[in-house]
Image (cartoon, coloured by chain):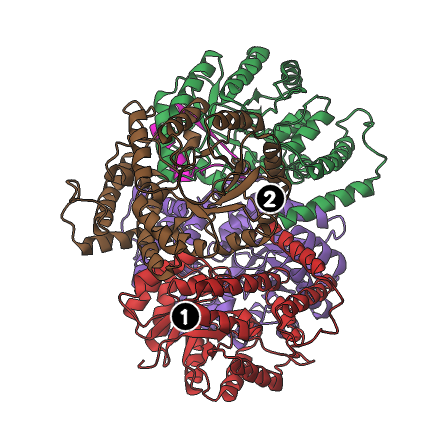
Chain colours: A red, B purple, C green, D brown
């Protein structure tokens, strides 16, 4: 607990798969190196982007083992450790502690939508027995919400809990947490999982982010982070607008995290196909998205040379595609 | 596939645990017998009431093994078979097929909220490879919704899919499914998971139900079912009102399925404590609920003699408690 | 208050408009006669179907005056009386009382979403001063919800409040209200505003309905109502399925209540165009809907002869169109 | 249209009422002066805070007349002009144009939840005929949402539409609008109605805000606005945290806008009682809120001397009260 507070950009890394759908270990190792070389502050295996629920308990352990072995202490690791119940979760915590991770991240109970009191009881029991620091993970879109009062209560009672990753994307919500917790736990970390608002979140006092997009354009995310940290908010916001455009295309045009898988393949990694089956229609849409993303990435200068896959679509085409994306996004009530 | 259509009341059974939190096999066997003796039409291990997500993959297999061994063919078994991904799910299907279950039930993908197209692709791949009949499981409160068009599409393309369990509780939704599917698949089964509306659902043409409450008061649920089947709708509705009162108390005053665990202990089973930790406040609330439920069960004549736990609370007290339940229910926007 | 309880089918009538967008009085009078001749039990001007919010306070009064004058006591009138605030609402109540309406219907406060306590205070003040019987109107899709506890509280304290119209479509919710209120107010009326579930609602003890569809096919709705009242639930449900098909097409393919306006024009009334502007795309969709509805109405034998507008679309076309409707409905998360 | 773009802080002013519930004209005039003296950039009568739906059409006109007469050109006026339908709304627009308002604000259609296409058609028809500049008003909590594509479409087609007030509080949503509209309409104004995020919104490029809180602490809101405009984001955020605390107390502990009415009375205005009745319980809660707000305002030094109403509550008491507020807020799922 004398360790430094969690800070900076942690990558919730995707897991490349091979032709048989198994973990592609060499490609995962190569990806870890690539990310570290591009300046990310930490790794975050078994996050939502890492599709932790689609792996078996043994595979989840294996993923952290590979990442930890490849990282070799260069950056801290935040390991997703949620398992079927508290006992299994604590076993995973022990295993990850043995691998030297900086902390574990535990998502609130999912499937059932539990009350604040139940969410409290769950984290309390974990925190009382975990052999490693714990970060809460709030993602109300997918799991039981962890509300502000519960965060404060846990921060007060559990020194083992050292931070929260919040993916709600709600800025005043983040501010309420900071306002409630910082006076009693100054070193408590607040990480946002919603890159669409990363710069404003940093302005509001967040310590960093755990964002799928950092796994796709680590250089840009790092530059944006550094600008915000240096108080260069106007320049940071200019990047934020570009990140938003890319993020929207990745997150709203395909079932999560397929858009990120396509984008990662455009960065040169053999991601393999995901474990969630895709219909023929979905595959066609992903092919379209691939071209949109190639164009978007190229415009920002992230890709060194024109991709063979990308047709000679002019900037207007991209505009049109992006507008279609927006339209579909509105239909889903998210615009 | 020449087998009879699924029909009647399948019990999504709770799993009794021992002091160490392990499956209490003797009590589970005793519970299975008790249910069959009281007239349930089938068993449904690894449902939401059975807290399938809180067990390990090995435990889920063990639960079905125990149930199948104890049932010994007296009634059909519908086995919850959802695992981390399609491959693991298919392995579970094979195992359960070997145990002689009538069909498996697969909940739509959860945690992520997937699009209709993704939900289709998921079930299509399972249905194309499953060695056993499959029922869809729609519970939009907890998992990705399976919409009417997707049900129809899957019913059209997949003979392996023989029915759907729907827990939305939305009567017109059920009617839309029946209207779309029955003309093309007359033997397709529709089971409702929302006992608050079981009688109207049966009137609308449902084939039966998979209801947590059937695990608590199997005799009453069976009587209600028989009355509705016999066209005695007015008498059936009188029971439906009583069932609603009990159901509301069990489902809305505690995090699911704690209220059902308490009720089952009142029927004489050592349920043990659940795997989800409970705060001190939650434990006090469950103790109150225990008294409310004891009173409710007694008033209906389900319990042979006054329970020692039940204080001499008069009917007015129960009314007051039920009203408090209602008030809390309203606060949650569910009233 | 010695008057009979509200019972049966009240029509929330649309208001025909002329070329200038003004109330088309002769057509409204003709419509009122047509409805009464076809067996509706009452009229309900200034409901949601009647677009009360799109008329001025003076027009709302005029609508009730016309209806009351044309009805001439043949059936009871339930007059929508919600105005900008309690004082204005009470003035409208006085006016409608003078016209001899059986009761007024007051929707819960809308625009702002008020707490149960505020909803209570609002209706209490109205009920304490109204010179006419009042029915609550719960339509949580559009207005602040009136929860079960609040209905009970108002029923207990306010003899002036004699019933509730509930458009939530939630059957257990209706049962909870009946369960809470009937023991203390046996004559209190429960009317459902959700025709997709009218028969099950009647089975559950509802006294009737206030359904837009009754304004389109009064004969069928009346027959369905009579069958349910006579305990002929299976036959009633057969009609309920047909009504559902028509209702879905009217309610989910166009902004409410445009689908009903189109349908009413198919019954031979000059409805005029609504006051809410329509885009070119909306107008094309309404033209398509017109053909679907013409076909649907014809199949049921409601229209005496083929409509000139209806192209020679075969039954397959209708099936296809209905499926498109369903698909669009799913996209909106309503399937 | 050669006029300057809307910019800065517009006050959606409350309307003081007298003992009889009528508009308190002298107090409204005094309030207008007080606001202008404290640096607000504009007035915004007939907004949601101004409870426009609780006044009659005649009263809404009278409110704008009083404000316009008292302002006498010192600051621009944005007048809420939504009436029962397009024709009535256009009549109000003409009246307000005659009073010299800078622009009108039109909320999207409410009560019914309309589709994007219908929302487009509505604003298009208004914009094509309005004799005055129009700002869109998006408040999806209360009215039909205006999505990003619709804003862009209207901005493209309608020069009369010169801006949007958005009260969704969703920062990426605001950024998407700015990203879509600014390239084609550089002078289009973006005002946020969610003061909990005003500083980040300004950082993102918003032109200003229309915030109820500006009507309570105009000096602070102006200072915060000026700091953000000057690029002093860290100092601006410090104020933003204080504003959030006050805002949360005003908005989440009472039915809107009662908390603001109480706060305004603490600033020395005779607000009178609102038109929405209050239960005894609500009145007690408002009395408590009064004390909390008095303490909060005093701590910030906004009130010159201790209020007689405020008991000698220490800072700890305030902390406790604020925490209770937070807890209630969580219960409503808003924390």
Residue, x 21% and y 49% (percent of image)? D301
Q: Is residue A288 above or below residue C47?
A: below
Res B129 → quadrant: bottom right
In the image, D285 versus B167, the foreground residue is D285
Q: Say which element carries label 1.
A: loop
In the image, A270 versus C238, the foreground residue is A270
- Give me the C-alpha separation between circle 1 and circle 2: 36 Å
Q: Chain of mark 2?
A: D
In the image, D102 versus B280, the foreground residue is D102
Disc 2 packing (10 Å; few <14; some 14–19; many ≥20): many
Q: At which x and y percent is residue B163?
A: 67, 57
**B250 lies left or right of A335:** left
Res A303 → quadrant: bottom right
Q: At which x and y percent is residue A240?
A: 51, 63
Q: Is residue B262 above or below residue B321?
A: below
**In the rendering, which numbered label is found on residue B113?**
none
Stretch of the chain drawn in magenta: C143-169
Q: Say which element carries label 2.
A: helix
Residue C159 sits inside the magenta stretch: yes
Badge count: 2
Residue A240 sits inside the magenta stretch: no
Q: At which x and y percent is residue C284?
A: 74, 37
Q: Which residue is mark 1?
A: A230
Q: Residue furthest right?
A: C312
């Amino acid at each position: 607990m004398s360790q430094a507070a969690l800070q900076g950009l942690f990558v919730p890394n995707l897991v490349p798969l091979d032709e048989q759908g198994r973990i592609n270990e060499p490609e995962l190792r190569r990806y870890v190196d690539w990310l570290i070389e591009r300046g990310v502050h930490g790794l975050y295996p078994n996050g939502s982007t890492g599709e932790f629920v689609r792996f078996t308990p043994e595979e989840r352990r294996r993923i952290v083992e590979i990442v930890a072995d490849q990282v070799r202490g260069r950056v801290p690791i935040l390991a997703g450790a949620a398992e079927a119940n508290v006992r299994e979760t604590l076993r995973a915590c022990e295993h990850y502690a043995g691998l030297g991770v900086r902390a574990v991240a535990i998502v609130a109970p999912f499937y059932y939508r539990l009350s604040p009191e139940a969410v409290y009881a769950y984290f309390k029991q974990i925190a009382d027995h975990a052999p490693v620091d714990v970060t809460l993970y709030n993602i109300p879109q997918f799991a039981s919400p962890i509300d502000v009062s519960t965060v404060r209560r846990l921060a007060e009672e559990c020194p083992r809990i050292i931070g929260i990753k919040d993916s709600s994307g709600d800025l005043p919500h983040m501010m309420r947490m900071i306002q409630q917790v910082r006076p009693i736990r100054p070193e408590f970390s607040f990480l946002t999982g919603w890159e669409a608002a990363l710069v404003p979140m940093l302005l509001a006092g967040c310590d960093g982010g755990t964002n799928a997009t950092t796994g796709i354009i680590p250089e840009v995310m790092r530059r944006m982070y550094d600008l915000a940290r240096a108080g260069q908010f106007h320049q940071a916001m200019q990047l934020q607008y570009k990140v938003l455009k890319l993020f929207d295309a990745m997150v709203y045009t395909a079932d999560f995290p397929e858009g990120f898988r396509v984008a990662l393949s455009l960065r040169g990694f053999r991601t393999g196909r995901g474990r969630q089956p895709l219909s023929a229609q979905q595959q066609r849409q992903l092919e379209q998205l691939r071209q949109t993303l190639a164009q978007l990435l190229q415009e920002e200068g992230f890709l060194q040379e024109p991709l063979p896959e990308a047709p000679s679509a002019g900037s207007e085409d991209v505009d049109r595609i992006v507008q279609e994306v927006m339209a579909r996004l509105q239909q889903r009530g998210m615009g």
